[in-house]
Image (cartoon, rainbow, N blue to C red):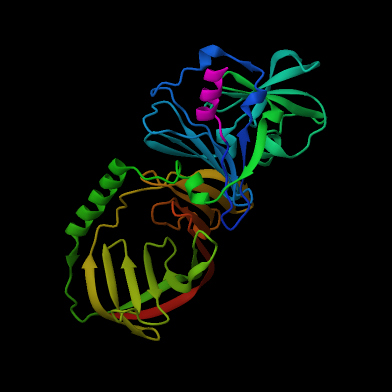
Amino acid sequence: MKQIKKILSCLLFFCVSLFYAQNKGYSINIDRLYLADESKSNNSDDSKIKIKFSSLDNGNYFVFNRLLYGNKTGKVLAYFKAFNTVVIRSQHKLSYLTFKEAFPKGGFYKTTTSKSLFGQQATLYAFDNDVLDIKLWVAPGARTGTGFEGYLNAMGLLQNLPKGNTIIAVSILGIELDMSNFKEDTYSNVKSNLSDVLVGFKEPKDSLLSCVDEKKQREKPFVANGEKIDLLFNYKISSKISLKDSKGKMVFETNTLVYSNKDNSVSLQIFDEPNSEGISFIYSNKNLGQIIEGTHNNDKLFMENGKLIDFQDCYILKEKINAKKSNITQLIAGDEYEFKLHLIEKNDVDFPDFTNQIISNGFVSKRITLTKDLEMQEYTSEIELGTYKFKLEK
């Protein structure tokens, strides 16, 4: 029993926090342990896994399991409820999945195994994700909606449990625990509780930076010859961009105005006020590989400097469809070189040829990005069809 107590103290703890929000977790009272498989008690450096279950920021984030440095097989799973996205991290990889991809059978699903527990006939429910060996013993009874059962339910993993049934025991790594073993605790610091997911990886990041640097070195200035060019745009795009820190405090908020042609290969961004370098417009022409910056006076654009660049992107996001309604497709995507989660809404029905940077075609009406610092970036935009004329003087 001493060895089992030691193993459980290393293996099983539930940690959550109070960081400007409610964060709940559970510790285990090992004195109430009633059954354990001694063969599961090996806790060598190669097999060591430190388990963690937590509900953070009023149930916006969930953590399931935890990696420990040096562990070659352990994984960590985090569910970002507002994004309906599950992020699974192995030692050197982040995978971004829709909830349905991560849990194709809905979380815990019924098996044909049953046995008598506490005088009741209980059925075993297995977990349809290999991040952790965890199973539930389910029997007739009233659900409390609290404790560890409430945690799993809030995460959406108990949809297969029939009404009038409740969890009476949990099996983790072959060690079975009475539900009364779990004691609720509160903790602080959301970010540290997500630290195993909010990570970056050196090799893919170095590769990306190398590509960007190579592109930069290929840039060439071009000399203006005084010619005047008539520009005609089909769309006017009004956007709002905001950034909130991890506490939800607004860091900045700004509006942008962009004109584009039908496939967005040629665009013109107009600033309300000149930037620190006195620039008040940026003209981009992907067909010619040109970027021109300068000042403007109403519909007249005056070039200050220009360069020839390679518009080919170093990195393309791998999108996954999260939901679809009418002409709006909602997608999730994540950066591979470090944690950065994107929720994108775009219209690819009315704007099938509208090109974007690093994502597929369609007009992006909304994009929310969660960074590894738990900052929330939000972009919303509206598009108007019209005829918009400008004269560019090079």
Relative placement, left or right, of 24 versus 7 is right
> From the viewer's perspective, is 23 left or right of 279?
right
For the question of whether residue 131 can be seen, the reply is no
Q: Nearer the viewer, residue 394 or 109?
A: 109
Q: Is residue 116 above or below residue 127?
A: above
Magenta segment: does it hold 5? yes
- Residue range highlighted in magenta: 1-13
Question: Is 259 in front, or is 205?
Answer: 205
Residue shown at 23% from the left, 49% from the top = 210
Q: Tell me residue 382's x, y (percent).
A: 54, 67
- The x and y percentages for residue 348 are 52, 53
- Image quarter hosting the C terminus: bottom left
For image coordinates 53% across by 55% down, the residue present is 346
Look at the image and tell me whether residue 186 can be seen.
yes
**Quadrant position of residue 151:** top right
The residue positioned farthest toward the bottom in the image shown: 297
Please tell me in which quadrant of the rendered image residue 126 appears.
Answer: top right
- Up the image or down, 69 lies above or below 139; here it is below
- Residue 229 is situated, as x and y percent measured from the top left of the image, at 30, 78
Instruction: Kindly identify the residue that appears in the image at 57 percent across and 50 percent down.
Output: 329
Q: Nearer the viewer, residue 99 or 170?
A: 170
Question: In this rendering, is residue 145 above or below 266?
Answer: above
Q: Overall secondary structure of the magenta stretch?
A: helix
Judged from this view, the residue extending furthest toward the front is 2
Examine the rendered structure and indicate whether residue 187 appears above or below residue 394.
above
- Percent of width and height locating residue 248: 55, 62
